[in-house]
Image: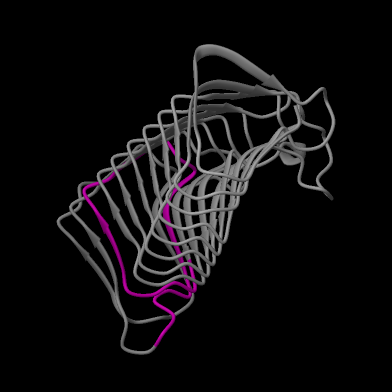
Amino acid sequence: GPVLVTKKLLIDGGGKAVIDGGGKGTVFTLEASGATLRGLVFTGSGDSHSSDDTCLNVRGHQNRIEDNRFEDCLFGVDLKQSNENVVRRNHLRSLPLPLGLRGDAIRLWYSMKNLVEENEVVDARDVVVWYSNGNVIRKNVGRRGRYSLHFMYAQHNVVEDNQFYDSSVGIYVMYTDGVEIRRNLISHSLGATGMGIGFKEASDSVLEGNHVVYCAIGISSDLSPYEPDSTITIKDNRIAYNGVGISFIGDKEGTLVEGNVF
């Protein structure tokens, strides 16, 4: 590397091809739509946050990123203004740096209707969905991160059947409306800021059928629901062995809590 692809291609490494950036800059940039990258190992980005040194930049639509390994890169997969892509069954790990200095494993920025599923994220910083609407994040596994999943200014996303372990925060929903969070397992989000699931000035969201266990705070609601006449529904969850089950910060009406097991 580095590699730049600007046309619709299928590149299949069969699990053996390695694309190495040599420790500088971004390893691979995909500026095309309808392409497939499969069975590749991406490694060796730079370590600069100012230039967002990344294993894979996606700058197109309807691409498929499947069955790849992303190792020893600052950022993993970065989608900017990229819609209807599939990011599936990839393994992602950041550079061996202190937690706050690692990069994000997967980042969606102004990117709509993407599917992120069955990926494994270990020892990275965050998975972020910012200014991005209508995405589905399901059946992923995250370990030893900071935010396993962080939404900000993102509308109508679906989060289901994920497993997040040993992060500072499991799922954080910030300035965001219409998120559906169902059947996820969040375990051991500990430390001074540890929480399983957090809402910050969020509205019209549903939290149903999740298991939130062994966290400092199970569920935190900070000035949520934020918009007038909106709701936050916390229903049929198991909230167990946390320091605090549910913490409400701020006197806001509109939260429905029912059918949960504490």
Q: Position of residue 177 (x, y in %)?
A: 40, 72
Q: Position of residue 207 (x, y in %)?
A: 29, 58
Q: Nearer the viewer, residue 9 or 201?
A: 9
Relative depth, front residue between 182 and 156: 156
Q: Is 201 left or right of 118, judged from the image as shown? A: right
Q: Residue at x 62, y 33 (%)?
A: 124
173 versus 5 height, above or below: below
Where does residue 47 sit, x and y in percent of width and height?
82, 34
In the displayed structure, 228 sits above or below 106; it is: below
Q: Is residue 20 above or below residue 49?
A: above
Which residue, as the protein is rendered here, is positioned at the far left? 259
The residue that appears at 55% across and 21% down in the rendered structure is 40
Name the residue: 49% across, 13% down.
15
Residue most extreme to the bottom: 228
Q: Is residue 217 magenta?
A: yes
Q: Quadrant of the N terminus?
A: top right
- In the image: residue 245, left or right of residue 223: left
Q: Which stretch is magenta?
A: 200-227
Asked if the magenta segment contains residue 75, the reply would be no
- At x 46%, y 70%, the residue is 176
**Residue 215, quarter of the rendered image:** top left
Is 119 in front, or is 192?
Answer: 119
